[in-house]
Image: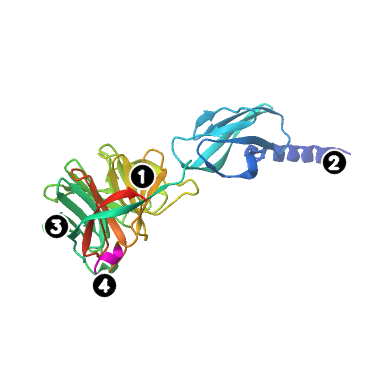
Amino acid sequence: MRIHIVFFLLTTFLVDSCSNSEDPTKFFEIQLEGRKKQFQNGDVIGIAIKNKKERDIKKVTYFLEGKEIETTNGKINLESATFGTKVLKAKVAYEDAFVEIEKNIRILAETAPQVYTYNILNTYPHDKKAFTQGLEFRGDTLYESTGNPGNVSKSVLRKLNFETGKIYEEVALDKSVFGEGLTIFGNKVIQLTWRSGIGYTYNASTLEKTGSFSYGSSKEGWGLCNDGDIIYKSDGTEKIWKLNPETLIEEGYIETVTNKSIFNKANELEYANGKIYANVWQKESMMIIDPKTGAIEGVINFGGLRDRVEQHSNLDVLNGVAYHQERKTFFVTGKNWDTMFEVEIVKK
């Protein structure tokens, strides 16, 4: 009899212990109207908590990216200052405890990008041996950064006359690294490399190297631009990183989205008129991106431009965009193109 009592008590203890050790995040699940995970900014959707273990729920509070959102008649407003992948959180008070559960959702732009085309204003010579990765003006002086596909040559950083192609100054990178985008901040040129996880700084006047910096969470180095306060960096993903201009530390990011999907093809960058202009990797097109939200507000079709340059075996894709402040025009070229085009961008 004593054996049966001991066995009963032991079994009860083990059952209680297993029950108490259950993960409370498994008790509940956030359910959204239509079981969707992708929404447009400002969508009002139904929301509920699936009570898997039939616990006594006292209260539920919802948060989007850490900010509490109100529930009205079982619905919430999915409005966010930035777009892309977001964390929707529910804090569930039940019985004498509470637990936080999460669901990843995507918030997209409200409207589709507008479509633009171009008019050619002028053409200028461009070094067809230059595998162009970065392009930016300082006054009338054009700064260019190149890569070295196949390590057949060194990547370079150069200053040149945009009208003649004459090189004023040039420095070569070590052959082991692949030069990528650049931007000019104050009297400092900042240049990326591709997969080395490191970038370099130079004196903008002399191109003397002044330092180096390592990347943070970004995967690679692609394009750079700045708005006078923030440096923006693309890395081959949907993210455009925000760098502190003094420390070059990544301090956040935006994600590039349309009204239908998250997009991950931003390459060379240029900042102009309050927007980020980004070459689309491997395409004859360019995006116009809102740097505050990540919304792709426009797409520029540069189809036909490559047909206007010398056709040769090393000819590669459109890449390189620079805005001339005084002329209010864009300059675009490509990898191993013999021509640079001055264009105006117009709605189609």
Q: CA distance from mark 1 to mark 2?
A: 67 Å
- Residue picked out by circle 2: 3
The local crowd at label 2, few if under 14, some if 14 to 19, many if 20 or more residues have their Cα within 10 Å, is: few
Whether residue 217 is visible, yes or no, is no
The local crowd at label 3, few if under 14, some if 14 to 19, many if 20 or more residues have their Cα within 10 Å, is: some
- Residue picked out by circle 3: 170
Q: Are marks 1 and 3 in contact (CB under 8 Å)?
A: no
Q: First in sequence: mark 1 or mark 2? A: 2
Q: First in sequence: mark 1 or mark 3? A: 3
Please state which amino acid type lies under the numbered disc 3.
Answer: Glu
Quadrant in the picture for residue 187: top left
Q: CA distance from mark 4 to mark 3?
A: 25 Å
> In the depicted view, which residue is nearer to us: 71 or 178?
71
Q: CA distance from mark 1 to mark 4?
A: 35 Å
Give the side of residue 90 with respect to residue 166, left or right: right
Q: Secondary structure at mark 4?
A: loop
296 within the magenta span: no
The residue depicted at 14 percent of the width and 50 percent of the height is 141
Which span of residues is magenta-colored?
Answer: 306-311
Q: Are marks 4 and 3 in contact (CB under 8 Å)?
A: no
